Structure formats: C-alpha cells, structure tokens
Image: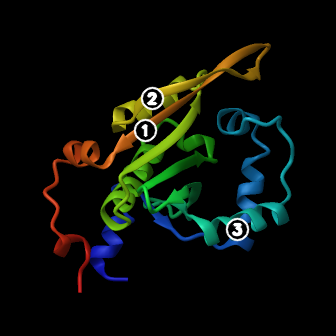
Amino acid sequence: MSEAEMAFFQGQLVRLVVPVPGEDGILVSDWTRDSEYWRLGMAEPARFRYPGSEKKWLEDFCKTGYPFMIVTLADHRMIGGIGLEAINHASGHAWLSVGIGEREYWGKHYGSEAIELILDYAFLWLNLHRISLNVFEYNSRGIHAYEKIGFTVEGRKREALLRDGRRWDILYMGILKDEWLMIKKKKVTPDEFYPD
C-alpha cells in the first residue's frame, strides 16, 4: 500500500486496519459483554456472542462489505470497529456501522475520527453518493457526534425500541458526498486519490 493510500486510513488518533476474523472475533465477543456497549449499538436483547459466531460474522462482513478495526496510534490498541455494509454500487449508497468497544476511549474523538476516515474512503475511493446510519433516540452523545461530523436526521421509526421501561425512536441519518466535500473543503482531483 502506498503512502497516499495509507493516509486515507490514518488520522491523528487512529488508523483503520482490515480485520483478522479469528483474532478479532474474540475481541468483538468480549465487547458484547459490556451492557452499555450492547445497549447503544444493538436493537436485540443482550446476550453473549461467542467468539466463533463473531468470527463468522466478520468473515461474512469481509465478503459483502468493507469492515475495519479501529486502532489507536498512541498505544496501538484495538478499540472498536467500523464498516460500510449493505452497499448498493448502482445507486452509490451504503450503511455505516461503528462501535467503540473499549469504554475508556468513549467521548474522546476516536470514533468521530474513524468515521471521518471511512467517509473519505467511501466518497473518494469507492465513489459512493450517500452514507446512511441509524441511531437510538436515547444515544444523545452519538447523535451529537454524527451531527457534528455532518450527518442530518432524515427520518425516524417511531417507538421501535423498548428499553429502560419505555419506547424509543430509531433515528435515520445520512450524509451526501457533496455535503462531505463541502465540510472537508477539498478540491478533489483523481490524481490525488488514485496514485500510480
């Protein structure tokens, strides 16, 4: 991989690396033991996910999407995962999923930087037109982070989730390539992003 390509996958705090399903499946399985991690990212009731099932999930994700693990630059620790899935190349659309599994890295811009890196990848390498995500109404920290990056709330599935003894909406958010480029204030030429 060239230096220009590496720059796409590295920021000031994190870099994105391709997962190794056998090894990383164990780590992802460990993260699912954290009830708050589960509560913020999974709509289904909490349950233990075995390393073997997470390995299979990562293997399948590698075949159909673009998964990455999030690694810190300071201490080279794998702290979460991010990926593009349900990709429709004909319409230029994909869904974003992201989760920081190590709690001590929450709220410190690691996840936001990983999203910024994958948006560059999605729009400038894959030439996608829009990226969507969903987030639970009670995840105010996540909603704020997505909005700060440039995502817009585009709709909601009302009272779709039962948590904490009440019903919550699932919000659908999206960002378009032109919006991202405006935010980044980049004038893009093919030579910049497709080096020889």
Indicate whether 75 appears above or below 193: above
Q: Which residue is mark 2?
A: 154
The disc at residue 174 is 1
Relative depth, front residue between 150 and 94:
94
Mark 1 or mark 3, which has the lower sequence index? 3
Quadrant where the N terminus sits is bottom left
Q: Which residue is mark 3?
A: 60
Mark 3 or mark 2, which has the lower sequence index? 3
- Identify residue type, mark 3: Asp
The residue most toward the top is 166
Viewer can see residue 13: no
Q: Is the residue under label 2 in contact with that under label 1 (CB below 8 Å)?
A: yes
- Alpha-carbon neighbours of circle 3 within 10 Å: few (<14), some, or many (≥20)? few
1 left or right of 190 in image: right
Residue at screen point 43% across, 55% down: 91
172 left or right of 130 in image: right
- Identify residue type, mark 2: Glu
The residue most toward the front is 90
Give residue 181's position: percent from left, percent from top: 23, 49
- Measure the C-alpha gap from mark 1 to mark 3: 25 Å
Q: Is the residue under label 2 in contact with that under label 3 (CB below 8 Å)?
A: no
